[in-house]
Image: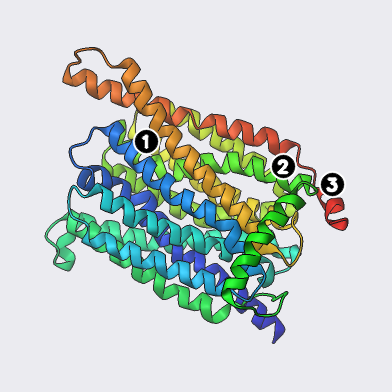
Amino acid sequence: MAITQEKKAVWGWAMYDWANSAFAVTVMSGFFPIFFKEFWSYGANVNLSTARLGLANALGSLVVALLAPILGAVADKSDARKKFLIFFAYLGALMTASLFLVAKGQWMLAVFCYCMGAIGFSGANIFYDALLPSVTGQGRIHYVSSLGYSMGYLGGGLLFLFNVLITLNPSWVGLPDAAAAIRWSFLSVALWWAGFTIITILWVPKGKTIAPKVPFSEMVRNGFKQVLTTLRHIRRLKMVFLFLMAYWLYIDGVDTIVRMAVDYGMSIGFAANDLIVALLIVQFVGFPAALVFGKLGQQWGARKSIFLAIAAYMGVTIYGAFMSKKIDFYVLAIVVGLFQGGIQALSRSYYAGLIPAGREAEFYGFYNMLGKFAAILGPALMGIVGLVSRRIMMPAAPSPEQVVEVGRLASRFSIASVIILFILGALLFFFVDEEKARNDLKHF
């Protein structure tokens, strides 16, 4: 019975990735950047719309980054991890559904709904990550973490494939055009996310409670106090601090490529349909690749596997800055699919081995906080580099052809800037010592 319950908890936990990846793929990476550029930000030049999209991503990430450690500390002092996951998941689903109502040209309202959806998505992930140690032991944690990402690729990819087919053939379901199909796709994501989250609610235990129940207002006050205490303790957990700094930098590059790849492709002249095909490649390559990376983390070691993924992303960034053909984007999609889930999953499970037991949500709050601050830096960096490069290179009286060419070249500079984050992240990660981390925990 115990084995059955453990398997049920593992699959219930992994199914939340299946549920919320619909937002990450269909909305965040797929249709929102396209629809934002061509529908909600209609009439703006490519670099301005990129800057607006970067602002949208940065704004949502900022809110979550500020809330994450407080929410984590509150949840660790109660049985509220699952409750917070449920709240943020359904907030995200509701705001995703609201995108259906946003009319053409209303880019600010689209940004608001998207930001709120991203807050729901990212906020729930804090507590989803924190539940990982409660559903499996250290011996299988790398594999289970990778299983979650693998299920996310499969679930998100299947719904995205359905929405792509409906967008290309809107008459199949009685819709007038592709724009209407994309708007309906946002509703499908909301229903998928909300529906499959029920499995997680029913199958995943709430996790360990390390303190008696107290009123919510007191939990919040205690949460603020605990954050200050944790900040002081991190000075003693030097390897945790160093890993968080490294993670902050290299995962910024990963998140930026995930969120801005479609926008970048459109800015340098690729057709929207080509970019959608590339995203589908990422999903269906990522499904088995994440499982393989989980096994690789167990056999070869999470540390070496993370370095391998960082190196691959450096190659992606360089190749992406110079690509010019449709096949180039497909090659990049395959490489990203091979390594994206792996670096995310192994970073999450590697971190679990560095932090104190019983305070996972609190420490994952900081983990997610840095991840979201990284997601502020990357898209904003791309937007700023693109706008500044455009201004520097644009002639005084440009021809229409020059405007297009300068815009594309500025976009290439913007994506190239991301490699700095991978380099710095790898350098800091090199100095993380697992043995020293374990010794620090003994005296914590």
Q: Determine contact: label 2, label 1, CB under 8 Å.
A: no
- Please state which of residues 292 and 11 is positioned toward the viewer in this rendering: 11
Front position in the image: 270 or 102: 102
Residue drawn at 87 percent across, 51 percent down: 439
Quadrant housing the C terminus: bottom right
The amino acid type, in three-letter code, at marker 2 is Leu
Q: Is residue 363 left or right of residue 312?
A: right
Q: Is residue 215 left or right of residue 411?
A: right
Label 2 near label 3: C-beta < 8 Å? no
Above or below, 374 against 315 in this view is: below
Q: Is residue 426 left or right of residue 274?
A: right
In the orientation shown, which residue stands out farthest toward the left? 176
Can residue 338 be seen here? Answer: no
Could you classify mark 3 by the number of other residues whose Cα lies within 10 Å: few (under 14), some (14-19), or many (20 or more)? some
The type of residue carrying mark 1 is Ile
Q: Which residue is under mark 1? A: 327
Q: Can you name the residue that lies furthest to the top here? A: 396
Q: Which mark is residue 242?
A: 2
x, y (%) of residue 434? 80, 48
Q: Are marks 3 and 1 in contact (CB under 8 Å)?
A: no
Q: Which residue is mark 3?
A: 436
Query: What amino acid is found at the position of numbered circle 3 in the picture?
Result: Lys
Q: How is the image coloured?
A: rainbow
10 Å crowding of disc 2: few (<14), some (14-19), many (20+): some
Residue drawn at (56%, 48%) of the image: 371
Task: State the SS at label 2.
Answer: helix
User: How far apart are labels 3 and 1 at the CA level?
Assistant: 46 Å
Helix, strand or loop under label 3? helix
Quarter of the image that includes the N terminus: bottom right
